[in-house]
Image: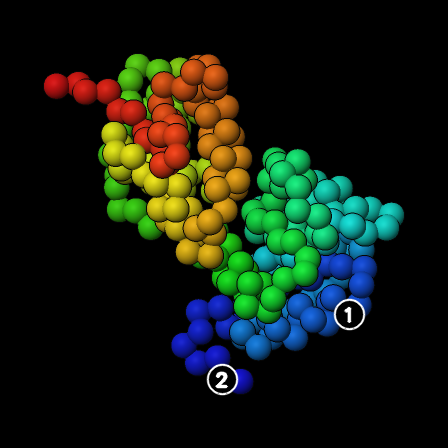
Amino acid sequence: MSTSGNPYSGKLILVVDDEPRMIKFVQFNLELDGFRVASAGNGLEAVDKVRTHLPDLVILDVMMPQMDGFEALARIRAVSEVPIIMLTVKDEEDDKHLAFNAGADDYLTKPFSPRELGDRVKAVLRRSTGPSSTATEVIEVDERLQIDFARREVLVEGERVNLRPTEWRLLYHLVQNANWVMTSEMILQKVWGYEYEDDVQLLRIYIAYLRGKIEIDTSDPQYIITDRGVGYRFAMPDKS
């Protein structure tokens, strides 16, 4: 199959699963999209191959013997910021929260279609490059919160706050549309891609993460305001 003009052609994906049939299924479909594929049968092998192969993205199964996917994720995150998609047979909010909090970039529930797999992989690779902004100004929201777009830094009470790439993208789009209510679907499309426009649960999780890093009181947020049933608004004070 020709991959001419394919921006993902040659990208290396590491697939980690203890089921050889699943590895073959994922590998076959990713190779049709022009990706190169390496594989690992357990978490320890995955950590080693992240170091030696330097993949562009890792697809990591949760349910594995000896070392489960969450422990493997923690070990990979200790040595690499490579994008990671978790695979699981479960579809529970607690598991999603645990995966994202541990540093996963996405979460895909088995069974899934080849198209969904390819769309998710491409979406994660797209957003791993960060927002394509030419903004250079430092925005002083108030005395407590400043955002430096050029350096991709957020200062809360003078202290730098570390944001993960997805958290930064979320804040970026909210601030760029300050004082306007963005629908949940609009935010999901801009931050994650059109493949995620219905995943309101995912958005709620990341809104909670971001509030936890910039708000004084997450139960009474002053920056990221919820418009129930619609979406979210970043409140920018009127300094006129």
State the CA–CA distance, disc 1 to disc 2.
Answer: 25 Å
| Residue that label 1 marks | 21
Determine crowd level at label 2: few under 14, some 14-19, many 20+ residues with C-alpha closer than 10 A. Answer: few
Determine crowd level at label 1: few under 14, some 14-19, many 20+ residues with C-alpha closer than 10 A. Answer: few
The residue lying at 80 percent from left, 68 percent from top is 20
Give the mark nearer the N terminus: 1 vs 2: 2
Depicted 7 relative to depicted 156: above or below:
below
- Residue nearer the viewer, 179 or 42: 179
Residue 66 percent location from the top left of the image: 87, 48
Does residue 162 appear anywhere in the picture? no
Eye-nearest disc, 1 or 2: 1
| Residue that label 2 marks | 2
Q: Is residue 2 left or right of residue 32?
A: left
- Residue nearer the viewer, 36 or 235: 235
The residue lying at 39 percent from left, 46 percent from top is 185
Depicted 117 relative to depicted 196: above or below:
below
Depicted 85 relative to depicted 218: above or below:
below
Does residue 143 appear anywhere in the picture? yes
Q: Is residue 142 left or right of residue 33?
A: left
